[in-house]
Image (tube, rainbow, N blue to C red):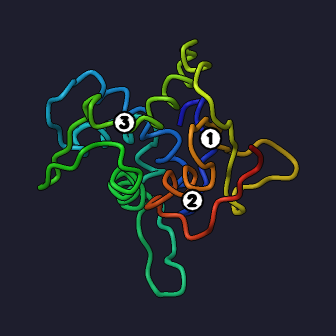
Amino acid sequence: MNDSQPDFEPTRSFAYRFVRYTVLPEVTKEVAKLGEAKFLLREIAWPIIDRLLTKEQQAVRVLKAKSEGDDSMSSIVRFYVNLLAKGLDLYESLGEGYFRAYTESEISEDDMVDAAIDSGDEEASEFEGWIYAFSFPSIFKTDGAFPIKIGKTVGDVKKRVADQVKGSASFEQPVILGQ
């Protein structure tokens, strides 16, 4: 992996974080170039994975939890690409492996407010609402940085956080760090 990527760990947790915070943002950049054209997720994601992980890293075998056997890091990462893309509702699923980017009319008002804030749009400051931060207990670190989500919503913070993590392949409840 290159210097800007996290250190490789042969674990399923690494695969999840790698896909969520590295691969899918790269995929989303490529999808944005396609407009409303349909695409096969694997045709965009697999070359990104191949660029970021060496063949040796992809071939590492990871034991299955609570059962016999193992999986290659490659198969775990590729599994999470599909799972997270669907679970996070990043793209519209058209079936048979095809997706397309959501059109502007399909994006909720809260999503537009969050996107405006993320991009520094000054009009976003005119909205009333809450700024919030949340994370998950399993990724908290007491001695360093850890991923958190910061956003702004015009509605109820608890509902907004619940909507964002619904289907996120997380088996724990998010913790709202502040609002």
Write the residue at 44% across / 30% down: 112
Q: Distance between the residues labelled 1 and 2?
A: 12 Å
**Figure quadrant of the C terminus:** top right
Rendered image: mark on residue 48? 3
Is 111 in front, or is 83? Answer: 111
Q: Residues within 10 Å of mark 3 (few under 14, many from 20)?
A: some
User: Percent position (x, y) of residue 67?
Assistant: 48, 87
Vertical arrangement, residue 109 with respect to residue 7, above or below:
above
Instruction: Identify residue for label 2.
Output: 10
**Front tag of 1 and 2:** 1
Residue at far left of view: 96
Residue at far right of view: 143
Residue at far top of view: 122
Q: Do the residues labelled 3 and 1 touch (CB within 8 Å)?
A: no
Q: Three-letter amino acid code at disc 3?
A: Ile
Q: What element carries label 3?
A: helix
Write the residue at 68% across / 36% down: 131
Instruction: Identify residue for label 1.
Output: 6
Q: Three-letter amino acid code at disc 1?
A: Pro
Q: How far apart are marks 3 and 2 (CA)?
A: 18 Å
Task: Decide which of tag 3 and tag 1 comes sooner along the chain.
Answer: 1
Q: Three-letter amino acid code at disc 2?
A: Pro
- Left or right, 130 with respect to 113, comes to right
Q: Is mark 1 on a helix, strand or loop?
A: loop
- Left or right, 163 with respect to 87, comes to right
